[in-house]
Every structure is written in structure tokens, then in C-alpha cells.
Amino acid sequence: RYDIEPAHYLLSFGAEFLGGGWGGAWSQAAFAEARSPAKNHVVCRYALVSPVRGQAGANCDDWFTATPGSEAQVALAVAKLVAAKTHYTGPALALVNAGDPAVAAQASGLTEDDLNAMAELFAANPAIALPGGVAGSAANATELAAAVMLLNVVSKHGLMSAGGYTGAVHGHD
């Protein structure tokens, strides 16, 4: 589950979370609350990393036009930068260290300054990253989802939870 409402920074990698295909009423309401200055006295900054700018992207503050298929590299590079800024030392560190900001910048057409700016905002504020959806999916959609999950983990903000059943499973407890 992605907790959008308390976020001060939302970094989407192509998620059409304002339409019915990715999110729906829950994500629309959460985004409206995040963007309301009456809530937490902050208006959430919304950045989009995607080659396309759909319905949700029309509302973004910053659009980083990435080369199609490079979003996973960008997410992993930003995760590596955020891990360094938050002094993350947990079990995901080995995976995050595979990120390379220089390679991601070259592959995506973005600059390393763009990646550093995303990482700075992500590390310094309650932030959430959203993976892409069906509209912008590519052959590496699984890698993108994993990289976005790692980004959320190393940020230490706790705005993403696994959800689902957490009780004992017969024969596995």
C-alpha cells in the first residue's frame, strides 16, 4: 500500500494513480489531501519520471522526460543516492549499491543533477515513490517495481507497507 496523503514529495515512475487503471478513488482522495495546504501546512511536490505525461502527469510540478525503458535505472540510482543521504545500512543496501547515477543519467537522458535533486527532496521529506502502471509499462516493469520498492525502503519514511494477510499460515508458523 502506498500512503500518499502524508507525503511532502511524491515521485512517480509513470503511475496513472489519478485514473481508475492504477489507483482509483483512494489514490485520488489521498493526492487531494496531500496537495491541500490545510493538511500539514504543506503542499506535496509531485515529480514524474516518464517518457509520457498522462492524466496524472498533467498535475505534476516537475516532469523528468526519461528515455522509455530507463525508469528502473533512474529509480535504482535515486535509491542509491537516498541510501547515502539517510545513512541506510539495512539488508537492501547490497541491491541498492548496484545503482549507478552516471549510467542512469546517460541511459535516461536526464542529468546527474536531476537525479541528485530528486534524491535530495526524497531523503529530506516524508516521501513516497510509485511504480509505473500499464500505460507506460515496458519489458523491465518488474525491475522498475523492485527499484521503486527499494527506494521506498531506504528512505526510512515508512509510507509504503506490504499490506495483505500478516497472520500465521498453517504449516509455516
Image (cartoon, rainbow, N blue to C red):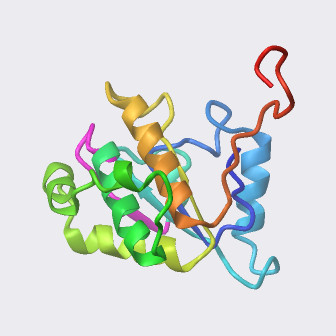
Q: Measuring 64% from the left and 45% from the top, which residue is drawn there?
A: 18
x%, y% of residue 95?
36, 48
Q: Nearer the viewer, residue 161 or 95?
A: 95
Q: Measuring 69% from the left and 58% from the top, which residue is drawn there?
A: 4
Principal SS element in the magenta part? loop
In reply to whether residue 62 is colored magenta, the answer given is yes
Q: Nearer the viewer, residue 83 or 15?
A: 83
Residue ranking furthest to the bottom: 41
x%, y% of residue 68?
26, 39
In reply to whether residue 68 is colored magenta, the answer given is yes
Q: Measuring 53% from the left and 80% from the top, which residue is drawn there?
A: 124
Residue ranking furthest to the top: 171
105 to 25, vertically: above or below? below
Question: Does any portion of residue 171 appear in the rendered image?
Answer: yes
Position of the C terminus by quadrant: top right
Quadrant of the image occupied by residue 30: bottom right
Question: Does any portion of residue 75 appear in the rendered image?
Answer: no
112 to 11, vertically: above or below? below
Q: Is residue 48 left or right of residue 101?
A: right
Quadrant of the image occupied by residue 44: bottom right
114 to 63, vertically: above or below? below
Q: Is residue 111 left or right of residue 88?
A: left
- Looking at the rendering, the stretch of residues picked out in magenta corresponds to 61-71
Q: Measuring 15% from the left and 62% from the top, which residue is drawn there?
A: 102
Q: Nearer the viewer, residue 171 or 75?
A: 171
x%, y% of residue 157?
63, 66
Position of the N terminus by quadrant: top right
